[in-house]
């Protein structure tokens, strides 16, 4: 309805300007007694002076109205369409709940898979080494008085196995919550991450304040995955990481100068980022046109 009304107004203004421009030079061919239309309605066209004066005035006025009204009506029409077509607050809430339900389910599945992975790593790696250490120490105790050389060898092997078990345990812990986050905070952890990156990485980190541990972990792993993808798949030579906080939102932007064309359906890297972020009610936007650059933008709620 609004399109019809606004369209008629525009056609009336623009049409009068065009019609007047056509009819003014031809006033002499019109039937006798013809009167001017538009703003000069009722005035008879009796000569070139009247036709040119009234015609020029009408063209200027209608052209000015068209120039002023068209943008105004277009903006008003756009606002009305947005108001009518945009989802209501209830619909937006329902969509958000649906998204959170799906991401929470994905997060629970990922959490279960992660727990099983950790259990396997501890069972097959660290636990096996600890059992071997215990056996060597038991043999050393039994041989303590009879074979000192065997005891020395067993103790040396137990010591080496202990160091290997500690190294494996540190690897497992890093996959749960990187110790560097607890020691140096997110800014320090990202600085260490950038220094270890396989390609040149520049960091722009603002004043982040206090951030919940879960958000810090998601931000850290998101940037780590983005840098890994850039180094492995994009043929990039440089990456830029920007992290800033605006109120209760933490924004992350990772850009590389690679070939672009990132496809979320290939591999699990980008999908993993999306699942981590959506599980915390965050947003992920990936812009990766063919030829590059690739930009990953993440927004996370970090209010207390």
Image (tube, rainbow, N blue to C red):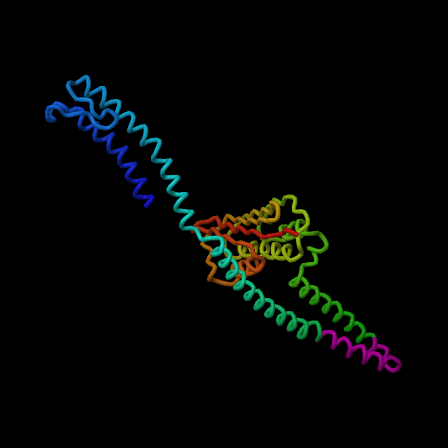
Residue at the far right: name it.
145
Q: Image point 44% across, 49% down: which residue?
A: 291
Q: Which of 297 and 148 is in front in this view?
A: 297
Q: Nearer the viewer, residue 128 or 185?
A: 185
Q: Image point 23% across, 31% down: which residue?
A: 18
Is 247 one of the magenta-colored residues?
Answer: no
Q: Image point 83% across, 77% down: which residue?
A: 151
Using the rendered image of the protein, determine whether residue 203 is visible from the camera's viewpoint: no
Q: Is residue 140 above or below residue 260?
A: below
Task: Residue 127 in the image: state x and y as whole percent.
Answer: 71, 74
Q: In this view, does 119 lie above or below 173?
A: below
Q: Image point 67% across, 64% down: which residue?
A: 171
Say whether residue 81 is left or right of residue 99: left
Magenta span dominant secondary structure: helix
Say whether residue 267 is left or right of residue 304: left
Task: Residue 260 in the image: state x and y as whole percent.
Answer: 46, 52
Say whether residue 83 is left or right of residue 229: left
Using the rendered image of the protein, determine whether residue 6 is visible from the camera's viewpoint: yes
Q: Tell how many labels.
A: 0
Task: Residue 137 in the image: state x and y as whole percent.
Answer: 81, 77
Say whether residue 287 is left or right of residue 76: right
Q: In this view, does 80 lie above or below 171?
A: above
- The region drawn magenta spans 128-151
């Amino acid at each position: 309805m609004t399109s019809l009304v606004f369209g008629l107004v525009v056609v009336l203004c623009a049409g009068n300007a065009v019609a007047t421009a056509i009819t003014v030079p031809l006033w002499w061919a019109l039937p006798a007694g013809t009167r001017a239309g538009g703003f000069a309605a009722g005035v008879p066209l009796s000569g070139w002076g009247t036709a040119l004066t009234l015609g020029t005035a009408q063209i200027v006025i209608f052209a000015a109205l068209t120039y002023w009204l068209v943008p105004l009506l277009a903006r008003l029409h756009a606002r009305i369409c947005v108001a009518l077509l945009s989802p209501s607050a209830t619909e937006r809430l329902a969509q958000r709940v649906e998204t959170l339900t799906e991401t929470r389910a994905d997060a629970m599945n990922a959490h279960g898979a992660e727990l099983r992975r950790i259990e396997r790593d501890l069972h097959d790696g660290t636990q096996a080494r600890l059992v071997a250490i215990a056996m060597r120490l038991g043999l050393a105790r039994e041989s303590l008085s009879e074979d000192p050389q065997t005891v020395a060898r067993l103790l040396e092997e137990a010591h080496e196995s202990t160091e290997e078990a500690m190294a494996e345990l540190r690897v497992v812990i890093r996959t749960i919550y990187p110790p560097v986050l607890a020691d140096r905070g997110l800014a320090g952890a990202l600085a260490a991450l950038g220094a270890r990156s396989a390609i040149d990485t520049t960091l722009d980190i603002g004043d982040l304040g206090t951030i919940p541990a879960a958000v810090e972990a998601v931000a850290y792993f998101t940037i780590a995955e983005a840098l890994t993808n850039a180094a492995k798949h994009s043929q990039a030579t440089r990456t830029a990481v920007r992290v800033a906080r605006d109120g209760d939102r933490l924004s992350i932007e990772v850009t590389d100068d690679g070939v672009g064309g990132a496809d979320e359906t290939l591999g699990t890297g980008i999908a993993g980022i999306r699942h981590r972020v959506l599980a915390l009610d965050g947003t992920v936007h990936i812009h990766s046109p063919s030829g590059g650059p690739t930009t990953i933008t993440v927004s996370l709620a970090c209010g207390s």
